């Protein structure tokens, strides 16, 4: 009898244990995190879980958030508070419980400035960027392959880029509070597309697809700017002063391709303006008409042009003086439908322009 009872109790116990095993333990594997931001913009604020961006919460009108179904254990919150502030907050979650955080004070966020291009000059299309483990997913580059990603809390992140015809590329970078870090990435064409090259992808702006299916600057003189010819798949000089360039081979004798104060590069001549006033006047004559010697380089007269880019606007169509001044011509005038500047003598007019009379007084214009 005792033996029979023992067997029966054992069977019941086994059934009980089996039944407990079938009960859902999910509520004990996840918890809830609640908190409030001291500074926030409810239109952009977002709280998510590092590594699991799908676990997320918005912020209400009082800056409060509730993050549900957070896996039990150690975790970290990824918080975007405003367009310029963010935070990462470590938290330990117990299954089945709710964690109430102290008020979170976001700090200055960082940003990644991405620059993405193909290693052989192919056109990158359909590109998407993701910051691994964060809500920043499927972001699109602009038509020049650039993108600013953020705001990012202080920390280190993985960044991945994918584009049509190119294998995905990943990189890791860290960013500090208020930092803007540039990340340059080069995509290599997928092996099965290498032979067909730019016949499939096309080429980035400024390049053309050569008969050998490679992206080059040119393969015919007609693809170069006026005054340049195609030599060895690149356009070579002599280009005039202030003309854009990417190497000395695009500049005329006596000038070189150099960085400009306003950004970019252009052909400029070198000069020297050291010494007394008399010597300075003599040295300034070394620069061509319309240019003055500035820090060892002949650049457009700063009193009349904001830089090389504005000097190149001479002769562009206009409908009033204001339009010309918007182009960086300090005393710009719209004469006969084209932008120009006033002059006192031929020394004031760059290039082939001549100082001549007009209804607006003496101005630089093409000789008629």
Image: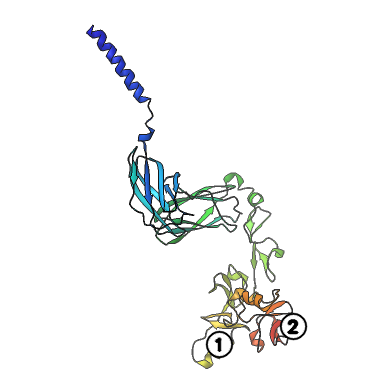
Q: Position of residue 264 (x, y in %)?
A: 56, 69
Q: Which residue is at a point 34% across and 24% down the rendered structure image?
A: 20
Residue at the far right in the pictured view: 368
In this view, 330 is above or below 195: below
Dot 1 alpha-carbon crowd within 10 angstroms: few under 14, some 14 to 19, many 20 or more: some
The disc placed on residue 367 is 2
Foreground residue, 336 or 124? 336
Foreground residue, 97 or 187? 97
Q: Which is more N-terminal, label 2 or label 1?
A: 1
Q: Which residue is at a point 59% across and 50% down the rendered structure image?
A: 126
The disc placed on residue 228 is none
Left or right of residue 233: residue 111? left
Visible in this render: residue 252?
no
Task: Say which residue label 1 marks.
Answer: 283
Marks 1 and 2, Cα distance to the nearest angstrom? Answer: 28 Å
The image's colour scheme reads rainbow
Visible in this render: residue 155?
yes
Residue at the far left in the pictured view: 2
Q: Quadrant of residue 229?
A: bottom right
Q: Secondary structure at mark 1?
A: helix
Q: Which residue is at a point 36% across and 54% down the rendered structure image?
A: 104
1 or 2: mark nearer the eye:
2
Q: Position of residue 114 (x, y in %)?
A: 51, 57
In this view, 186 is above or below 254: above
In this view, 156 is above or below 289: above
Residue at the far front in the pictured view: 61
Foreground residue, 86 or 275? 86
Quadrant of the frame with the N terminus: top left
Q: Position of residue 252 (x, y in %)?
A: 63, 75
Dot 2 alpha-carbon crowd within 10 angstroms: few under 14, some 14 to 19, many 20 or more: few
């Amino acid at each position: 009898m005792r033996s029979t009872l023992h067997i029966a109790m054992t069977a019941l116990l086994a059934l009980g244990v089996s039944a407990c095993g079938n009960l859902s333990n999910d509520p004990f594997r996840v918890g809830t995190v609640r908190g409030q931001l001291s500074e926030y913009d409810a239109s952009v604020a977002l709280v998510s879980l590092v590594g699991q961006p799908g676990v997320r919460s918005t912020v209400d009108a009082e800056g409060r958030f509730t993050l549900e179904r957070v896996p039990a254990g150690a975790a970290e919150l990824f918080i975007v508070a405003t367009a310029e502030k963010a935070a990462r907050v470590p938290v330990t979650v117990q299954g089945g419980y709710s964690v109430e955080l102290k008020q979170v004070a976001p700090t200055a966020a960082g940003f990644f400035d991405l620059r993405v291009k193909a290693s052989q000059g192919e056109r990158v299309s359909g590109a998407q960027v993701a910051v691994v483990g964060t809500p920043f997913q499927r972001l699109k580059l602009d038509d020049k392959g650039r993108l600013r990603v953020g705001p990012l809390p202080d920390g280190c992140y993985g960044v991945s880029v994918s584009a049509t015809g190119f294998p995905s590329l990943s990189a890791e970078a860290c960013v500090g509070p208020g930092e803007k870090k540039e990340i340059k990435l080069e995509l290599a064409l997928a092996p099965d597309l290498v032979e067909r090259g730019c016949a499939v992808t096309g080429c980035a702006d400024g390049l053309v697809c050569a008969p050998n299916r490679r992206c080059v600057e040119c393969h015919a003189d007609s693809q170069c700017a006026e005054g340049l010819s195609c030599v060895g798949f690149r356009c070579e000089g002599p280009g005039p002063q202030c003309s854009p360039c990417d190497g000395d081979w695009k500049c005329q004798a006596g000038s070189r391709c150099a960085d400009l104060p306003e950004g970019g590069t252009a052909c400029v001549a070198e000069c020297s303006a050291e010494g007394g006033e008399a010597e300075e006047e003599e040295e300034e004559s070394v620069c061509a008409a319309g240019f003055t010697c500035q820090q060892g380089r002949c650049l457009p007269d700063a009193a009349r042009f904001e830089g090389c880019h504005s000097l190149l606007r001479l002769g562009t169509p206009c409908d009033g003086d204001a339009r010309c001044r918007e182009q960086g011509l300090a005393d710009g005038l719209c004469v006969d439908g084209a932008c120009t500047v006033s002059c006192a003598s031929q020394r004031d007019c760059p290039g082939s322009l001549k100082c001549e009379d007009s209804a607006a007084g003496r101005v630089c214009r093409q000789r008629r």
